[in-house]
Image (cartoon, rainbow, N blue to C red):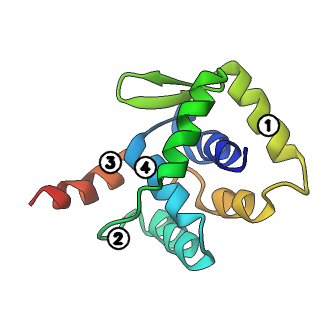
Amino acid sequence: MYKISQLLLILYIASRGGRSRLPRLHLFNWALKTRERHSTLVEAAKQKKLTLAAWGFDPAFAIAIRYAIAEGLVREVSSAYELTERGHAVAKAVLADPDVLTEDKSALLAIGKGITETMVEDVAKGWES
């Protein structure tokens, strides 16, 4: 439930149109693990440049994505994942509860929608060389 809630918040707070590709979702999941990492994303959003060389891909988060799809909270669209109407409602409820995921919500609100798909793709291009 924790990882599913994180996923919903990432899509709701920090993604344009409630949609994101997998590498970007994993970037946010990775960044939410420590204050230093989410501070790095806040700075990247301000500078409009992502300078990370790489980040981790969490198998537990990948499983959470699959569960969120199975529960009708998220759907796959093209090469991305998108909140469903039900997912929007759950994300709003999590966001409204002051006792749930307070640090994650604070970090995501600070980052906002400033980390774009293009920024993530530019970093990922370097992985191929």
Q: Which residue is disc 2 drawn over?
A: 52
Which residue lies most toward the bottom here?
36
Circle 1 crowding by C-alpha within 10 Å: few under 14, some 14–19, many from 20: some
Q: Which residue is disc 1 drawn over?
A: 92
Residue 118 numbered mark, or none:
3
Relative height, residue 50 to residue 71 (above, below): below
Residue 3 appears at what percent x and percent y? 65, 48
Q: Amino acid at mark 1?
A: Lys
Q: Earlier in the sequence, mark 3 or mark 4?
A: 4
Relative height, residue 75 to residue 11 (above, below): above
Q: Earlier in the sequence, mark 2 or mark 3?
A: 2
Determine whether label 3 and label 1 are within 8 Å by CB.
no
Q: Earlier in the sequence, mark 3 or mark 1?
A: 1
Closer to the camera in the image, 14 or 75: 75
Identify the residue at image location x=62%, y=31%. 68
Q: Secondary structure at mark 4?
A: helix
Residue 90 appears at what percent x and percent y? 78, 32
Identify the residue at image location x=80%, y=46%. 95
Which residue lies most toward the right here?
98
Q: Is residue 115 visible?
A: no
Q: Which residue is disc 4 drawn over?
A: 24
Q: Amino acid at mark 2?
A: Leu
Q: Amino acid at mark 3?
A: Thr
Residue 36 appears at what percent x and percent y? 56, 79
